[in-house]
Image (cartoon, grey):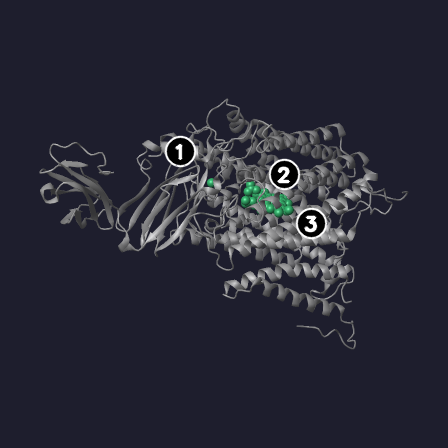
Amino acid sequence: MRISPGALLVVIAVLVPFVVEFRTALSWFGVELSVLESVALAGVLVLGLLVWAMWPQNGGEMGSADSN
Amino acid sequence: MAMRNAYVDQFPSEARLISAAFWSSFLALAIGGSLGLVQALHRTDYLRFIDSVDYYTVLTAHGVLLAITFTIFFLVGIFTWAVTTSLDRGLEDLRFSWAWYAMMVVGTVLVGVSILGGVVDSIDMQADVLFTFYAPLQAHPAFYVGLVLFVVGTWLAGADWFRTWWAWRGENPDERIPLPTFMTLTTTLFWYLCTLGVALSILVLLLPWSMGIVDSVNPLLSRTLFWYFGHAVVYFWLMPAYMMWYIMLPKLSGGKLFSDPLARVVFVLFLLLSTPTGIHHQYLDPGIAEGYKFIAMTNTMFLLLPSLLTAFTVVASMEHGARQRGGTGYLGWLKALPWRDPVFTGMALAGLMFAAAGFSGMINAGMNINYLVHNTWWIVGHFHLTVGTAVALTFMAAAYWFVPQVTGKQLWNRSLALGQVLLWFVGMTFMSNAMHRSGLFGMPRRTAEPQYQGFNFEPAAGTVGEINAQVALGAALLTIALALFLLNMVMTTIGGESDAIPDNTYAGTLSGPEDAPVVLDNLKLWTAIATVLVVFAYTLPLASIIDAGGLFGPGIEGFQLTIGIDPAIVLESVREVMP
Amino acid sequence: MNIHTYEKVWLAAAMVLIVGFIATITYGAVGPGIAMIDDEAGSIDPAEINDDERFAEPGVEHVGGNEYEVTVVAQAWSYSPAEIEVPANSEVTFYVTSRDVTHSFSVVGTNVNTMVIPGQVSEMTVQFDEPGEYGILCNEYCGEYHHTMEGKLNVVPEDEFDLTELSVEAPDEVDAGNETTITANVSNGMQEDLETTATLEIGEQQSERDVTVAGDSTEQVEFTVDTADLGEGDHDWTVTVDDYEESGTLSVVADDGNASADGGDGDA
Ligand code: HEM
Ligand SMILES: [Cu+2]
Ligand SMILES: [Cu+2]
């Protein structure tokens, strides 16, 4: 673990306003994400975060390969 | 529990008073918050189990219980803790202290019962006037009496803190005022200054009028006096949260407050500028000349300064703490902060949301842009970030530290507490973002059914349905977070005493009071300047309002457009008088 | 007092930001002449609204050129008039007051938004460039049915806009053999002359009169109807002026006969 589970939880929570506001901001440029797409985006981000957090500190052998 | 040195060990009687104040506050939060969910579901048409006409009774209760009762009961608890802890002496006379607490309770009960009368037939009262009670909507006299009692209770609480400080000063004539006490006293001073406005409005205009002693009211005058108080009150809620960010957050981060002198400067600025800004809530009011609105706007913009300074000091103190804990790097230090601690995380997230609220606040403050958002749901989104999160979430997080301090009992479940503050943060993100966005296309606030016959709202992006869903989702998450908070508080209180309560301390400073010019502690001077600023900002507008409409207005009687009027009959009678 | 360098920089930046805000807003408010709601329009006694020069007959008035005045009275829980029509390319000054409690007059999704406080008159001037339809709503709580308080603002293309009114005076019945008159009152609320044609259709017949109505006045157009051409019985008539029409029924009865009761609704 690179960060504590508590900190990980906090990062995930703070991610929510970023995704929500990102979606709002994109809509001003005419790009409208559907709810599903936004949830998917958030899912990908959280997954990436988890992979990063779980990755062994000093370049271990391999991580889980189930990314989208 | 030999070595324990919690607040309850130092000041057992004061601890009981503070506990009582906290519980009064939590009770208001429990009721008010649940009503919030009712409102959110009703407006968005997900679930309507009350009549739309009763929506406004619910909304009055939500506004009063949360904005006034919840916040101020918590505040008197924190300030009592701050004064006694930092002066290291108890209150002068606990009987007096319980008296002001009792007065606040009686006031709240009177207000609560008169509001409840709006939905309970057996109570022959009503106060469906929302927490702003704009005349000529008229409430039962008990509502106004209750408000006055509550406010006078807070005045006496302020007197209590001053008394304690005077007694301390007698024994320590050459010492600087300790920072927490300094914060309490400056806040109390502007509270005296601003509550004078509502007190006058209620005692001279509204109460006699609701009792039929005078038969007319000047709506613009009472409204202006309300906002004379109404902006300062938002800083009254905010100051205890600021106090927590200044004196608790640095300690929780593992370090010290960056600068005591600047903290003093910030609180002095709030004392000076909180009140002469109220007219910024009246940018859209007729009967007030543009120049006065402009003065209010300028003062408002300068009020950004103390908040920006606070942002700096708080972040710098947190960084200092993180580096003490071994944090390194430009942003890497963030990782070294105690994110598993719900007290720290709750306050930090509350601060983050307050920064976001600062942006929507700047929009509100602009005289011209305000026309787009005034009285829309944008505003409601804004103040759920400020009072509904910056203040409320800081208070909840603080409670996780304070309740063990004043009860001697350990927090029931720390992980649950962490989950709770995160859930509140996420819930508020959804609700507030949707409220802001719907304000931009004109969705009004304070409206039971914002669905109209003759037109549809046209969101710039997304759909009304999607925005409603987001509000309902956010409100549901918030309500769950609220329930978890209360659960934790109840379980903590009914739990057993614990030896593992940390000592009652607050943050030290890197640059201490010895660096602060002595003049900063001259409360008389700052009060005098604050008074002069208020006189400048308000004398002329009030004079011209009274000049144009008279002290009691041109024969404007009270309206209770609420009790059992059939709209058809009202419309009929309205049509009769219509040309 | 000892202030950290970074803090000094931050302080300076904060001041620049604040002064910058004030400057832009001042420019925005004073520059392009956007007027704020203020105390210009004065105060009013709500009890006297029906006798007030401005508010006794709320509605749209032409001031001259492309300038219009719209007066609106707000009351629980409606606006009068409930529907407002103004032309595109116009400059419209709204005057709004309240008969009872505080309301708002808010044109949805625009910055046309004002509080409406009893005892006060809100004045605001708005430029309407394009045609469009807007909702109006009250966004200040004004009692139990506050959520039902709404109105409509239609900005119509310039050439579809007028302030013409038509009212017709006609008898319900007339004895066979007599002549009678149907009178059309054409009033013109605009300040310019109105040149138009009034048309009466009755039975199989149709007659037209050209009429010029001076600004802010009313003209009478009289159509003479000869019952001999119509014959006995009920005859439907319609008077048309531009897009306005009014109709009724004229009964031609035998000289000696009695009045029939179903004589139509005459003039309104
Ligand atoms: C469970 C959490 C909460 C929910 C679901 C919630 C929901 C709402 C909703 C939907 C409204 C808008 C009503 C309308 O405009 O028609 C509202 C108004 C308001 N809320 Fe909350 N709220 C919550 C917590 C809070 C908190 C913690 C505070 C303050 C400490 C607060 C203060 C207010 C105030 C002052 C109003 C305005 C009342 C008025 O317009 O008269 N709310 N709330
Ligand atoms: Cu304000
Ligand atoms: Cu209303």
Residue C117: where, in percent of width, then height? Answer: 44, 37
In 3D space, how far apart are the residues under numbered discs 1 and 2 (Cα atoms)? 36 Å
Q: On what subunit does the disc labeled 2 rest? A: B
Q: Secondary structure at mark 2?
A: helix
- Which residue corresponds to mark 1? B572
Q: Residues within 10 Å of mark 3 (few under 14, many from 20)?
A: many
The answer to whether residue A39 is above or below residue C102 is below
**Residue B279, x across and y down, in percent:** 50, 41
Amino acid carrying mark 1 in the image: Glu
Q: Is residue B391 visible?
A: yes
Q: Are marks 1 and 3 in contact (CB under 8 Å)?
A: no
Q: Residue furthest right?
A: B2
Where residue C38 sits: x, y (%)? 41, 42
Vertical placement of residue B210 versus B330, above or below: above
User: Marks 1 and 3: same chain?
Assistant: yes
Q: Secondary structure at mark 3?
A: helix
Find disc 3 in the rendering and name its residue: B481
Q: Amino acid at mark 2?
A: Leu
Mark nearer the N terminus (2 vs 3): 2
Question: Same subunit under labels 2 and 3?
Answer: yes
Instruction: Determine the residue located farthest toward the top in the rendered image.
Output: B213
Residue A14 lies left or right of residue C215; in this view the side is: right
Query: Which kind of residue does numbered mark 3 sit on?
Result: Ala
